[in-house]
Image (cartoon, rainbow, N blue to C red):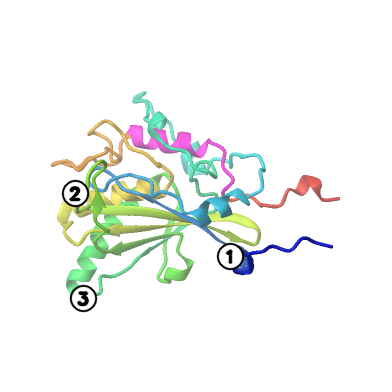
Amino acid sequence: MGRKTKHPILNTLINLISQRLITALAFFIGTGLLIIFTNLQSSDGFTKIPKSIHSELIISLLPSSPLKPHPLPSTLAQWQDNTNSGDYFSQVTTTEVGYLVWSQFPVRVYVEPPKTANEKQAQAWVNAVLQGVEEWSNYLPLRRVEQPEIADITIVRKAPPLQISPGSNITRARSAQTTYELYTSNKVLSHRFTILLSPSQTGEYLIAAARHEFGHALGIWGHSPQQTDALYFSQVRNPSPISHRDVNTLKRVYEQPTTLGWSLVDNSKIN
């Protein structure tokens, strides 16, 4: 006969916690939602949000299948830097699922028209954002979409949450924020990005912010130490266009292994 505890209240509490953990786990697996990270840099921060207990639990459930590279998209395969400008690939951070590369093209982009501006102002904002975004189309295939639900990357005119400076309780505003979310679709691990651009950004600084954040969303999950690169870690008075070093870095990222875009089922074990 099983031994009975002398603490029925403790027994009830343990059973309740177990049931809730099972329910929560079933919810996360059922929806396919895995984890959300954020990237904030010097003008926008670039600090990874600490993972929650649920996030760590879901990531731990991913199969330990080997990371594999995808074939280079033709636009990057054809890219040659005759200036030998180098890159800043060493500054790019990998993640729990490998490098954040896209494998299905064109990458679908949705730019949400501002809801708090009149039609003329809203269109001017969208046009400026698209100017920064479309510069990247020379290196990866992109397509603008009008339906946010099918977008791979969504860009919104919205103030990012305040950032708490490391080592203090001082908060400060940011000009932009880029976050990504992992999910599963047909047993394939996928991701999508959301970019927030502060309403305070205007003119060439808005274009530069869109260009910079979109570089992160295409897979450059890090910053350049040189002001002449679009992914320089801080906002400057005269923003740079996409440089050879930016493209060299992007190409190296797309040569790296990842679990994104691959099936979570190990086909080698299927008879």
Residue at the farthest top position: 84
| Front tag of 3 and 1 | 1
Magenta stretch holds residue 31: no
Q: Amino acid at mark 1?
A: Ile
Q: Amino acid at mark 3?
A: Glu
The magenta span reads 244-260
Which residue corresponds to mark 1? Answer: 17
In the displayed structure, 267 sits above or below 113; it is above
Across and down, in percent, residue 72 comes to 54, 40
The residue sitting at 31% across, 34% down in the picture is 224
The residue sitting at 66% across, 43% down in the picture is 64
Magenta stretch holds residue 253: yes
Judged from the image, the secondary structure of the residue bearing numbered disc 2 is loop
Across and down, in percent, residue 107 comes to 46, 56
The quadrant in which residue 221 appears is top left
In the displayed structure, 270 sits above or below 7; it is above
- The tag earlier along the polypeptide, 1 or 2, is 1
Residue at the farthest front position: 6
Q: CA distance from mark 3 to mark 1?
A: 52 Å
| Front tag of 1 and 2 | 1
| Front tag of 2 and 3 | 2
Is the stretch drawn in magenta largely helix, strand or loop? helix
Which residue corresponds to mark 2? Answer: 170
Does the residue at mark 2 contact the one at mark 3 (Cβ under 8 Å)? no
Circle 2 Cα neighbour tier, 10 Å, few/some/many (<14 / 14–19 / ≥20): few
Across and down, in percent, residue 106 comes to 48, 55
Q: Amino acid at mark 2?
A: Ile
Which residue corresponds to mark 3? Answer: 119
Considering depth in this image, is 123 or 69 the residue closer to the camera? 69
